[in-house]
């Protein structure tokens, strides 16, 4: 996800300044002559490349969900399921603010191409992964590249498309996220069912290669995109590598603690307690470091003095977290409990993602017409908590009409109120801070996904293990964990399968309960957001949030 403002894009063409920059934005509309914009085939190729790059990023967030049950079959275990999502979102979120600064201080074209290379390497590692740990590493590397592509793709558009046509182009890119959300589960299911789940990652290689070739040969860096000339030491300070490392370290400790607790080690073991203490210490150190760094920091502490950001950040964290738990655990429900094939699971997921795509536009239209973003967030989070509560009632014998209706209700209510925290935060800062405040909110949003899927996994595994001795006393719990979700019906005989599925359902309900809790906390956060009506913007001043 990225943001562009019709009067503000990435900072370019400046000379060294003794003051740290607080933005990645600057007016470029007056720095590029109209005859310098590409035309004809070159314009089509560059805009197409930008759209496809954004599509790959969005697809990588959703395509894995329906493949996870089959991945657990091949790697014989459920322990790393949360990492398949968390590793990607952790690196994507933690490095996104610094990715924007990379394009400010380094060559835009080469920064984009290097980001694509990193993304492709991560995808290749995922595709050839011989074990679960390698897949997690690949997902983390792909997330790093995706952070650079998300900023670079929209930056290329800003230097390729004239201002008068840019809103239409931004609308197309925004729709790309919705299309990817719909196609992701379907493609993931189709590849897994008809070819191999590894093609969920291999598909990025040829498509990304075509994008890279188009940008390499047809994107000529305009003078307005000349990077800032400052010392290497200052560039490194602006990128805040220490902050990124502290953020990733704290998140990793938290995820490992949840993965080990009650499974590999008891919750009161020194390993789990040590990881939780490490998470807390690293998080506190991160806050202190960011405050010390001031305007050089990736988080820009001064922005959090504004209530519009300090209240919307936790809302985005919990609200997006609730959605991602469902996106990753509903396919497990369909393939394990209902015995659906991967492609059928993707089709079963359509009510959720289609409703989300449609009602995201509806929520945006309501906010645009009324300016009442907080009220939309209040209503949406309240309804989503109720809707996910209905998802929690899903069981082994639930009828098709119920899981279709519950998913539609959930997708509609979540999407209706998903992105408006960005609108509120953007409306209360000047143009110089638009990119910074957006990157900060997206950090919380993506990290929220990493946390929620990890908590969901811990709840799922712990409740599954606690219930199994009661419902299937003769079954080895280790065998259940080593059996992939879609292989349960093939591995366990008919006399014990009902007990295993019952325990699985208890575990899934625990994961769904996490989604309910995250949505409920988001609802409480919405009560703290200022009720102030969004200020009116002229059409050429309206920030456009993508994704």
Image: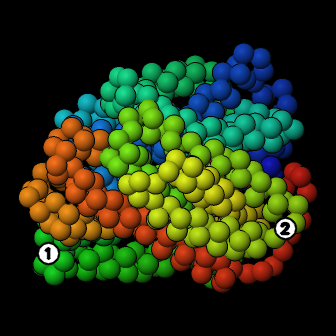
Asked if residue 522 lies left or right of residue 433, the reply is left
Instruction: Name which of mark 2 and mark 1 comes first in the sequence.
Output: 1
Which of the numbered marks, if any, corresponds to residue 266?
1
Asked if residue 514 lies left or right of residue 364, the reply is left
Name the residue: 31% across, 63% down: 507
Which of the numbered marks, if any, corresponds to residue 235?
none
Q: Residue 358: x, y in percent? A: 71, 47
Give the CA distance from mark 2 to mark 1: 50 Å
Q: Nearer the viewer, residue 546 or 374?
A: 374
Q: Residue 400: x, y in percent? A: 52, 47
Q: Is label 1 in a helix, a strand or a loop?
A: loop
Name the residue: 12% across, 78% down: 269
Q: Residue 302: x, y in percent? A: 60, 78
What residue is disc 2 on?
Answer: 371
Residue 528, relative to residue 197: is it above or below? below
Residue at the top extreme of this rendering: 41
Q: Quadrant of residue 40?
A: top right
Q: Are marks 2 and 1 in contact (CB under 8 Å)?
A: no
Residue 238, relative to residue 265: is it above or below? above
Q: Nearer the viewer, residue 50 or 519?
A: 519
Estimate how packed mark 1 is, as few (under 14), some (14 to 19) or many (20 or more) residues with alpha carbons within 10 Å.
few
Name the residue: 58% across, 26% down: 215
Asked if residue 195 lies left or right of residue 290, the reply is left
Name the residue: 82% across, 60% down: 366
């Amino acid at each position: 996800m990225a943001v562009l403002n019709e009067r503000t894009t990435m900072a370019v063409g400046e000379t060294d300044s003794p003051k740290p920059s607080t933005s990645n934005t600057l007016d470029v509309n007056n720095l590029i002559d109209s005859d310098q914009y590409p035309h004809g085939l070159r314009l089509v190729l560059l805009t197409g490349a930008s759209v496809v790059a954004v599509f790959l990023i969005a697809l990588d967030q959703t395509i894995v969900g329906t493949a996870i049950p089959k991945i657990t079959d091949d790697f014989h275990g459920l322990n790393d399921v949360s990492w398949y999502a968390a590793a990607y979102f952790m690196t994507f979120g933690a490095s996104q603010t610094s990715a924007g600064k990379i394009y400010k201080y380094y060559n835009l074209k080469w920064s984009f191409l290097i980001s694509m290379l990193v993304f492709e390497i991560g995808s290749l590692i995922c595709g050839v992964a011989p074990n679960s740990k390698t897949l997690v590493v690949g997902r983390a590397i792909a997330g790093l590249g995706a952070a650079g592509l998300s900023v670079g793709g929209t930056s290329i558009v800003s230097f390729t498309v004239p201002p008068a046509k840019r809103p239409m182009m931004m609308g197309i890119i925004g729709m790309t996220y919705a299309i990817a959300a719909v196609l992701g589960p379907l493609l993931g299911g189709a590849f897994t069912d008809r070819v191999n789940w590894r093609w969920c990652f291999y598909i990025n290689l040829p498509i990304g290669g075509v994008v890279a070739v188009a940008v390499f040969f047809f994107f000529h860096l305009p003078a307005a995109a000349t990077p800032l000339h400052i010392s290497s030491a200052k560039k490194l300070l602006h990128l805040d590598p220490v902050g990124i490392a502290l953020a990733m370290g704290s998140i990793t400790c938290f995820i490992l603690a949840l993965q080990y607790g009650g499974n590999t080690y008891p919750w009161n073991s020194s390993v789990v307690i040590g990881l939780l203490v490490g998470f807390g210490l690293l998080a506190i150190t991160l806050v202190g470091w960011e405050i010390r760094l001031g305007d050089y920091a990736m988080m820009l502490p001064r922005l959090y003095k504004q209530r519009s950001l300090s209240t919307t950040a936790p809302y985005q964290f919990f609200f997006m977290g609730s959605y991602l738990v469902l996106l990753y655990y509903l396919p497990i429900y369909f393939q394990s409990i209902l015995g659906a094939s991967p492609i059928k699971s993707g089709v079963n997921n359509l009510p959720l993602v289609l409703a989300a795509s449609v009602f995201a536009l509806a929520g945006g239209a309501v906010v645009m017409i009324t300016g009442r973003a907080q009220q939309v967030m209040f209503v949406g989070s309240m309804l989503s908590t109720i809707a996910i509560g209905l998802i929690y009632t899903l069981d082994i014998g639930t009828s098709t009409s119920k899981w279709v209706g519950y998913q539609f209700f959930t997708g509609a209510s979540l999407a209706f109120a998903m992105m408006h925290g960005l609108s509120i935060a953007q409306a209360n800062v000047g143009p110089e801070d638009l990119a910074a405040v957006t990157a900060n909110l997206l950090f919380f949003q993506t990290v929220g996904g990493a946390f929620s899927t990890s908590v969901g996994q811990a709840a799922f595994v712990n409740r599954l293990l606690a219930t199994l001795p009661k419902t299937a006393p003769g079954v080895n719990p280790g065998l259940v964990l080593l059996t992939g979700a879609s292989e349960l019906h093939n591995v366990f005989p008919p006399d014990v399968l009902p007990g295993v599925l019952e325990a699985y359902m208890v575990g899934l309900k625990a994961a769904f309960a996490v989604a309910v809790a995250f949505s409920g906390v988001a609802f409480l956060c919405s009560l703290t957001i200022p009720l102030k009506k969004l200020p009116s913007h002229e059409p050429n001043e309206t920030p456009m949030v993508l994704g």
